[in-house]
Image (spheres, rainbow, N blue to C red):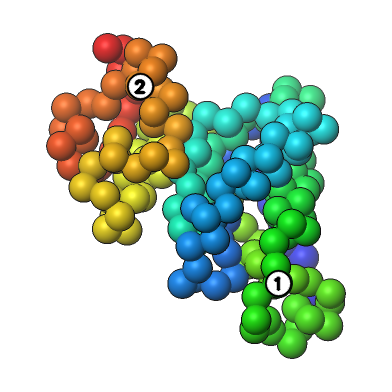
Amino acid sequence: MSRYRRLVVPGGTYFFTVRLEDRSSDQLVREVALLRDSVRLCRRCWPFAIDVAVILPDHLHMIWTLPHDDGDFSRRWRLIKSTFSRHVEAPARRSRSKAERGEKGIWQRRFWEHRIRDAADFAAHRGFALTAPVRAGLVARPQDWALSSLHRDLAAGLRLPSAVSGGYGPVARERA
């Protein structure tokens, strides 16, 4: 088994992409209430702030900020993924290796993470996440996708830069 080295920084801010095993699935949008409950349960046990979240049919993007004394994002993802998986049916087909390990085969085994280095890096990754539904051809504008933290930001008085509001591209926080 491979051993992945991850840059763990207590109190760090990270961008994540987490995918379902079946890339043709729409399970995350169909089961979004379960996904939200899985995240809530995890945050009760292992707190973290969700700076950005966008849920797409077969994958999700999030930016988290961890507590100042804790950098264990892998434990959090393991809890979220396992809680979600326990409450959905196993797919009709799963790989032999997943079956042999007793895995349900809902999620890809790992996830992609990137430690956010500064405000520009945050803005670039926030823009990438918020515009993902547009790039996927699901909506014409980021604000048209319901399963996005963009709506929380807009309600808090933040707005999209004018160049993004009619299309997509890097998104930065601006006061309304």
CA separation in Å, label 1 and label 2: 37 Å
Front label number (1 vs 2): 1
Residue 90 bears which disc, if any?
1
Residue at the spot of label 2: 154
Residue 70 visible:
no
**Label 1 Cα crowd, 10 Å radius (few <14 / some 14-19 / many 20+):** few
For label 1, the SS is loop
Left or right placement of residue 96 versus residue 55 in this view: right
In this view, 86 is above or below 62: below
**Residue 46 placed where, x, y %?**
79, 33
**Residue 56 placed where, x, y %?**
45, 53
Q: At 23% across and 42% down in the image, what residue appears?
A: 141
Q: At 39% across and 39% down in the image, what residue appears?
A: 146
For the C terminus, which image quadrant?
top left
Left or right placement of residue 152 versus residue 105 in this view: left
Amino acid on which the number 1 mark rests in the picture: Ala
Q: At 65% across and 75% down in the image, what residue appears?
A: 91
Q: At 45% across and 32% down in the image, what residue appears?
A: 149
Left or right placement of residue 8 versus residue 176 in this view: right
**Residue 156 placed where, x, y %?**
41, 14
Compare residues 70 and 47 and report the one nearer the observer: 47
Query: Of the residues under marks 1 and 2, which one precedes in the sequence?
Result: 1
Amino acid on which the number 2 mark rests in the picture: Leu
- In the rendered image, the residue lying farthest to the bottom is 96
In this view, 149 is above or below 8: above
